[in-house]
Image (cartoon, grey):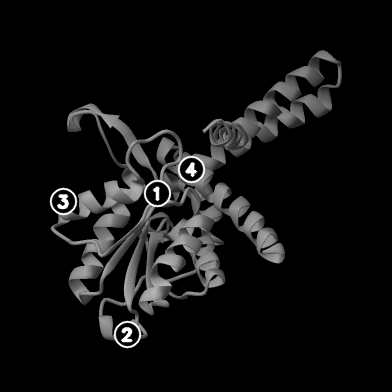
Amino acid sequence: MPGMTAYLFLRSLLAPPGPQLLLLLAGLWCLRRRRPVLGRSLIAVALVTLYLMATPFGAGLLARGLERHPALPAAPRAWQGAQAIVVLGGGRERTSPEYGGRDRPNYWTASRLRYGAHLYRLSGLPLAVSGGRVLDETESEAALMARSLREDHVVNVHWEEAGSRTTWENAMLTRALLAPQGIDRIVLVTQSLHMARARMIFEHAGFRVLPAPLDFIGPGVARRPLLLRLAPSPVHFTVSGQALHEYGGLLAYRLRMLVD
């Protein structure tokens, strides 16, 4: 899929630290062109944003505008008549040698599956998983997710939506799968950073959505001592990059909804 490969490559270039590296190069170019004030300013912005994005403080600030939904109540009777649980795919680890070279769900997907299995045991609601093939994979992400739920969590999957490559397609194809079953009220499982965008699109597709977010960032940051909130780590840089991706996705999908 050359088009999807090019899209993923471009998305990687635009994600941190790509913009900061471009700012650094631009700053160095300005210094060579004897524009020291502009050059030093660009370099300073690049370094400061790199540092802040790598700290719990910076990651928490970026997450604050995305973590809009509280945790799902533990009592299923409070779930507003939900009819099914939908777990979204979040990516895969390709050809894992420890599993005989098979693909497996990545960290994000595995975390969603674990929580989806927990909600299934609480409620007994039927489970749907959603995720297709992004590149040249032999198995859909939905198939990987269903196998993990069966083998790792001893949970059966009722529906597999195996054609989607984006959150938008997750919503539209899951709607096409569940609407003939009379299902329009769902518990939606995904990370707290992703939930705002996912809920918006699933409601646009026609579902009534009860958010079931997980892996909250803000509460963990708030409990850290102040000094440790300013300590950089690769984990929080990744969180910051994911948050920026979600802000961009929210904007892009809102524009798409205007013409859909």
Query: What element does badge 2 sit on?
Result: helix
Label 3 to label 4: alpha-carbon separation: 34 Å
Q: Earlier in the sequence, mark 3 or mark 4?
A: 4
Badge 1 density bin: few <14, some 14–19, many ≥20, Cα 10 Å: many
Label 2 to label 4: alpha-carbon separation: 36 Å
Badge 3 density bin: few <14, some 14–19, many ≥20, Cα 10 Å: few
Query: What element does badge 1 sit on?
Result: loop
- Circle 2 or circle 1, nearest the eye: 1
Query: What element does badge 4 sit on?
Result: loop
Q: Which residue is mark 2?
A: 78
Label 1 to label 4: alpha-carbon separation: 24 Å
Q: Amino acid at mark 3?
A: Asp
Q: How many marks?
A: 4
Which residue corresponds to the image point at 50% horizontal and 63% vertical from the top-left?
172
Q: Which residue is mark 1?
A: 90
Image position, residue 221 (x, y; %): 42, 54
Which residue corresponds to the image point at 45% horizontal and 35% vertical from the top-left?
135
